[in-house]
Image: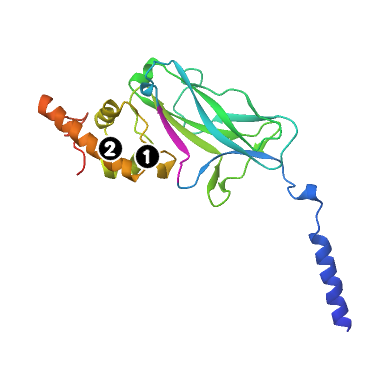
Amino acid sequence: MKYLSIIFVMLMMMLASCKKDPDAVFSGKDGITFYYKSGAEQDSVSYSFKFNKVPKTRDTVWIKMRLVGKLSGKARKIKVIAGAGTTATQGSHFILPDFVLPADSFQVRYPLVLLSSDDLNTKAVRLVLQIAESEDLVVGTRGAADVSTVNAVQFKVNFSNRLIKPDYWSYIAYYIGEYSAVRYQFMIDVFGMSDFRPDTKGGIIGYAQWVNIKGRLRNALDEYVSQHGPLLDENGGKVEFPL
C-alpha cells in the first residue's frame, strides 16, 4: 500500500504540472514569417516589367506573411530587409516599405515595390527578402507549419526588364519544351498573356487546357515557319513544340 500511495501522489503531481493557464499556451515572443503552399508554390517568384502591356516604372509584388504566436488588439511593426545573396540595389531596383501586421490579424501581404531601371534591360537581379526582428515581432519559426503550408524566413524575387524564366517552367516543359526567351515570347504573342502557371502550382491551367495549348502552339509555329522559315532561339537552336 505504501508504494501505491507514493505512485498516486506522483501521478497527482504530474497532472497538476500539466495544467496551464490559457494565456501560457504560447509563452514565447510572437513572430512573423513568409509562407507558401507546400507543393503548389515555392519560396521564390520571377517578375519582368516586360510582361506589362502598359509600360510601368514601378510595380508592387505582394508577398504572403503570417503570424507565429498570438493575436493582438494593436497593429505591430514588421521589419523586412535585403538578405545575403541579394544582387539588386535598394533605392534603384526596389523599395522595402515600412509595414505593420494589422490589429487582430493572423495574415497579411507585404507590398514589395520593384523599380524599373535602365540596367535591367540587359540583366536580371535577385532580391532575397529577409525577416528581421522588429520592436513588436521576432523572426518566426521556419519549416512545415501544417500539412499544406510551409513557413520561411526568406523569400526570393528575381526580376528584370527582359523576359525572365518563370519559376514554374520545369512543371510545364513536358508540354512545351525547355525554356528559351524566344520560345516564351512566341507563346506570349500567340496567347496574348504571359502567365502560364499550372493549376498544380497555384495557377488555373489544368491538364486538358495544356493539351489544347500545345496544339495551338504547334499550329501557330507551322504557320510561322511557312512564312518565315525556322524559328531560332537566342542560342541558335530551332524552336519546336513536343507532339
**Tags 2 and 1 touching, CB below 8 Å:** yes
Give the residue at x 57% y 45%.
142
Whether 46 is among the magenta residues is yes
At label 1, counting other C-alpha atoms closer than 10 Å, the crowd grade (few under 14, some 14-19, many 20 or more) is some
In this orientation, which residue lies closer to the viewer: 141 or 53? 53
For badge 2, the amino acid type reads: Ile
For badge 1, the amino acid type reads: Ile
Residue to which mark 1 is pinned? 205
Residues drawn in magenta = 40-47
Percent coordinates x, y for residue 135 in the rendering: 71, 31
Identify the secondary structure beneath mark 2.
helix
168 on left or right of 180: right
Whether 156 is among the magenta residues is no
Comes first in the chain, label 2 or label 1: 1
In this orientation, which residue lies closer to the viewer: 237 or 172? 172
Q: Is residue 67 visible?
A: yes
- Viewport quadrant of the C terminus: top left
Percent coordinates x, y for residue 11 in the rendering: 82, 70
Residue to which mark 2 is pinned? 213
* Distance of label 2 from label 1 (alpha carbons): 10 Å
Q: Quadrant of residue 151?
A: top right
Q: Quadrant of residue 152?
A: top right
Give the residue at x 58% y 34%.
131
Percent coordinates x, y for residue 31 in the rendering: 66, 39
